[in-house]
Image (cartoon, rainbow, N blue to C red):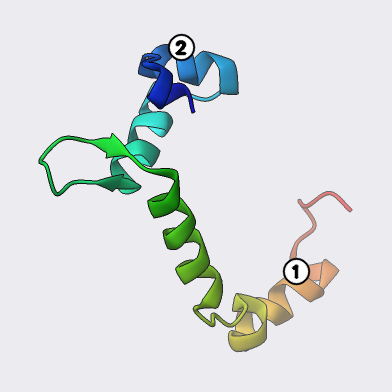
C-alpha cells in the first residue's frame, strides 16, 4: 500500500523496522516487470507466497541423520544454551 501511495523505500523501511535493502529486494522480487519498471503488485506477491507454500520441502532434521544426531545429543554441543 505504501508503494501505491508513492512512499519512498526508506520511509517504508522505517515504518516496518526493516532495512531499505530488504524492502527493495522484496519489491523487486514481487514486481510485475512487463513494462520494465518495478511496479509492485500485491497479487504477484501473494502468488509467489502461495506457490512457495505448495512446494513440498522436507525438514533438514528429518532428512539429515548426522545433523539430527548432533542437535539431539546435548553432550556434543556443550556451548549451546538450553
The dot on residue 11 is 2
Q: Is residue 61 above or below residue 45?
A: below
Helix, strand or loop under label 2: helix
Residue lying at the far right in this picture: please name it: 82
Residue lying at the far left in this picture: please name it: 36
Question: Do we see residue 55 in this rendering?
Answer: yes
Image coords of residue 32 (percent x, y): 25, 47
Residue 56: quadrant of the picture: bottom right
What's the residue at 80%, 57% (across, down)?
78
Q: Label 2, label 1: how many angstroms apart (C-alpha)?
A: 46 Å
What's the residue at 78%, 52% (across, down)?
80
Front-most of 49 and 82?
49
Q: Is residue 1 above or below residue 27?
A: above
Count the numbered circles shown: 2
Q: Is residue 5 above or below residue 43?
A: above
Helix, strand or loop under label 1: helix
What's the residue at 35%, 37% (across, down)?
27
- Mark 2 or mark 1: name the one nearer the start of the chain: 2
What's the residue at 11%, 42% (across, down)?
35
Image coords of residue 51 (percent x, y): 46, 70
Image coords of residue 44 (percent x, y): 38, 53
Residue count near mark 1 (Cα–Cα under 10 Å), binned few <14, some 14–19, many ≥20: few
Contact? badges 2 and 1 (CB < 8 Å): no
From the image, state whether disc 2 or disc 1 is nearer to you. 2
Residue count near mark 2 (Cα–Cα under 10 Å), binned few <14, some 14–19, many ≥20: few
Question: Do we see residue 17 in this rendering?
Answer: no
Front-most of 54 and 35?
35
Residue underneath mark 1: 76
Front-most of 1 and 27?
1
Image-based side of 14 in relation to 5, left or right: right
The dot on residue 33 is none
Amino acid at each position: 500500500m505504501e508503494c501505491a501511495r508513492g512512499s519512498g523505500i526508506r520511509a517504508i523501511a522505517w515504518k516496518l523496522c526493516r532495512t531499505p535493502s530488504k524492502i527493495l529486494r522484496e519489491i523487486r522480487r514481487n514486481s510485475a516487470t512487463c513494462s520494465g519498471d518495478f511496479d509492485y503488485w500485491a497479487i504477484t506477491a501473494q502468488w509467489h507466497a502461495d506457490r512457495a507454500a505448495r512446494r513440498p520441502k522436507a525438514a533438514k532434521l528429518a532428512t539429515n541423520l548426522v545433523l539430527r544426531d548432533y542437535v539431539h545429543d546435548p553432550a556434543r554441543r556443550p556451548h549451546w544454551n538450553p
